Image (cartoon, rainbow, N blue to C red):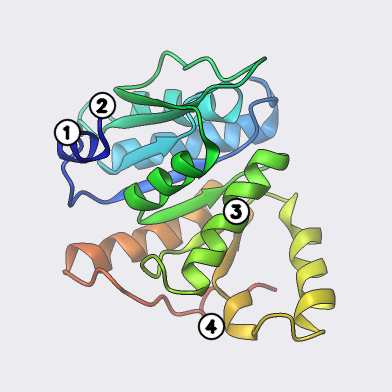
């Protein structure tokens, strides 16, 4: 399926949220429950969800979304990647596409996303976070919020502030492109504001960074 065909199938102008996160976190883990809850909230609101389509937190997000979208009809989308030992597509997807090259998959995420939520994860999740952040920083994509959800990110944000930011490796405005949400409800506050701006026709909205300032 070509990129254009995929976008047409998904309604090109529809608002979508991507959730990135670990394939290794299992059901019963509090972090799994958080991502599952966020997926359900997005489904209930009629917002399409995009994940990597694999195991762990991707299943958490897609399964929660499927439950929440029973009445809204929102799509649960998986962008799968061919790997030697993991990444079989999960069963909670309405639409799926498989990639063999990571960079192609990352670009697809960026083309489809209006908001990015980064849940706890490892190397792959960090790659997705950094790629998203850089493209927003250099304005190669629209000014979409990047939400870091969960306690894992507190130390990372402190490190960014105390090391590369203090050394002026990037600007303070770049730091505030990131939003820290401790809970799914806090993540939804940012998503809801972005969604309302989108519905009003403001495709390049700018959130009130002071309101969501990382503490």
Label 1 or label 4, whichever comes before in sequence order: 1
Circle 4 or circle 2, nearest the eye: 2
Which corner quadrant of the image does residue 85 belong to?
top right
| Disc 1 to disc 2, C-alpha distance | 10 Å
Rendered-image quadrant of the C terminus:
bottom right
The local secondary structure at tag 3 comes to helix
Label 1, residues with CA under 10 Å away: few <14, some 14-19, many ≥20: few
Q: Are marks 4 and 2 in contact (CB under 8 Å)?
A: no
Circle 1 or circle 2, nearest the eye: 2
The local secondary structure at tag 4 comes to loop
Label 4 or label 2, whichever comes before in sequence order: 2
Which corner quadrant of the image does residue 41 belong to?
top left
Q: Residue at x 62, y 30 (%)?
A: 32
The local secondary structure at tag 1 comes to helix
Q: Are marks 1 and 3 in contact (CB under 8 Å)?
A: no
The percent position of residue 119, horizontal first and vertical second, equals 61, 44
- Depth check, front residue: 7 or 23: 7
Q: Are marks 1 and 2 in contact (CB under 8 Å)?
A: yes
- Depth check, front residue: 173 or 5: 5
Q: Which label is found at residue 129?
A: 3
Residue extending furthest toward the front: 101
| Disc 1 to disc 3, C-alpha distance | 26 Å
Q: Which residue is mark 2?
A: 1
Q: Which label is found at residue 210?
A: 4
Q: Which residue is mark 1?
A: 9
């Amino acid at each position: 399926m070509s990129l254009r065909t995929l976008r047409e199938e998904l309604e090109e102008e529809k608002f979508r949220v991507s959730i990135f996160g670990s394939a290794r976190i299992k059901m019963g883990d509090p972090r799994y429950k958080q991502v599952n809850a966020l997926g359900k909230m997005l489904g209930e609101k009629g917002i399409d969800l995009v994940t990597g389509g694999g195991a762990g937190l991707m299943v958490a997000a897609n399964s929660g979304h499927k439950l929440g979208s029973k009445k809204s009809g929102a799509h649960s989308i998986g962008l799968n990647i061919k790997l030697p030992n993991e990444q079989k597509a999960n069963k909670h997807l309405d639409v799926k596409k498989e990639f063999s090259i990571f960079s192609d998959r990352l670009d697809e995420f960026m083309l489809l996303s209006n908001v990015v939520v980064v849940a706890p994860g490892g190397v792959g999740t960090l790659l997705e976070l950094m790629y998203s952040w850089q493209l927003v920083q250099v304005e190669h994509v629209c000014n979409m919020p990047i939400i870091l959800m969960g306690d894992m990110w507190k130390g990372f944000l402190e490190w960014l502030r105390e090391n590369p930011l203090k050394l002026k490796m990037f600007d303070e405005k770049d730091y505030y492109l990131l939003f820290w949400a401790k809970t799914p409800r806090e993540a939804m506050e940012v998503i809801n504001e972005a969604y309302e701006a989108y519905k009003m026709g403001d495709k390049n909205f700018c959130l009130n960074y002071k309101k969501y300032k990382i503490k």
